Image (cartoon, helix red, strand yellow):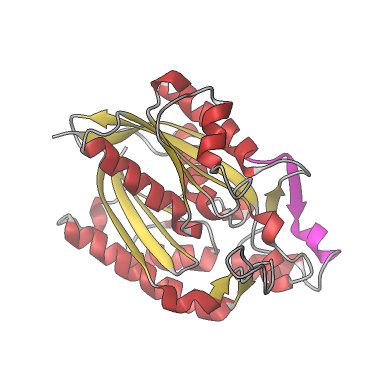
Amino acid sequence: MTFSRILGTGGFLPEKVLTNSDLEQMVDTTDAWIRERTGIRQRHIARDGETCVDLAEAAARRALDAAGLTANDIDLIIVATTTPEQTFPSSACLLQHRLDIHGCPAFDIQAVCTGFIYALSVADKFIRTGSAQRVLVVGAETLSRIIDWTDRVTCVLFGDGAGAVVLGAADEPGIISSHLHADGAYRSLLQVPAGIGNGYTGSPYMEMKGNEVFRVAVTTLGRIVDETLEANGMERSDIDWLVPHQANMRIIQATARKLDLDMEQVVVTVEDHGNTSAASIPLAFDRAVRDGRIQRGQTVLMEAFGGGFTWGSVLLRY
């Protein structure tokens, strides 16, 4: 059988940093309030004219370098994003052009904060079926473009960034399993109402009912942890690292407790990055690989929950 494994990782954050102190000057909030409820102290914000494809390109090139590959080695590109550079072509096609790659498939996936998990799962299946050998998987977001900066419920939470991995064919499992779910019945709890199909009626900004989202997220992520372990006949103690979606420190801590993991085994970047949606997991994974925490041969659980609602997990051996 053919399996897939991660060959290299990359990440990129815009230069501009927006701190909680900066937000105190913009909306009715405080640094202490934001830290207590979210764990966030700062987030990165794309400059004017800086798009999700700009961020994706920088992260992708770093992942290719880490994998020891060139763009010509890639035969599939998948970009997970909620904030594409334009309606079409896809951000994946635009990234393909930037990298001077021609002819291979390239497409976007939109599953909001679970987007990278969805994209990694799809890439794994392409490799397992022999349809691809080297896949570039990117999560890239400029969420600052869909945030109402007068809404203190949402503007304190989100940031911009991009993370990438190169996935390659292997003889032994790297990605062990993936588990994807969605339920559109919860759309009103977390959404951007305006869209092309409805003539841009409604707000063009993100709307969130935070308390309701928190309750569903904690319960749902607990279930996906159980599902992933049961599907693979594994115990909680078999997990070396948890790399969660970086939405909220309280949600991350609740998932760690579900796994009986010490927080030292959880990769946390929400303090510095905020919630970067589809970019959050690959950014966190890249940081922990590059600083030496995550080592080859270790078992990693990635999990995410996002608007839709969507949720899912990837279990892998790095």
Q: Nearer the viewer, residue 166 or 228?
A: 166
Q: Nearer the viewer, residue 291 or 229?
A: 229
Check the picture and name the quadrant holding the C terminus: top left
Q: Is residue 29 above or below residue 70?
A: below
Let me know if residue 22 is in the magenta part.
yes
Residue 271, horizontal then vertical, whole percent: 61, 55
Q: Is residue 96 above or below residue 313?
A: above
Query: Within the image, what quadrant is residue 11 found in?
Result: top right
Residue 197, horizontal then vertical, whole percent: 57, 66
Q: Which residues are magenta?
A: 13-25
Q: Nearer the viewer, residue 214 or 99?
A: 99
Residue 251, horizontal then vertical, whole percent: 48, 67
Q: How many marks?
A: 0
Let me know if residue 154 is in the magenta part.
no
Q: Residue at x 26, y 30 (%)?
A: 169
Q: Residue at x 62, y 43 (%)?
A: 52
Residue 91, horizontal then vertical, whole percent: 55, 42
Query: Within the image, what quadrant is residue 221 found in?
Result: bottom left
Q: Is residue 157 above or below residue 314?
A: below
Q: Is residue 298 visible?
A: no
Check the picture and name the quadrant holding the N terminus: top left
Q: Nearer the viewer, residue 103 or 241?
A: 103
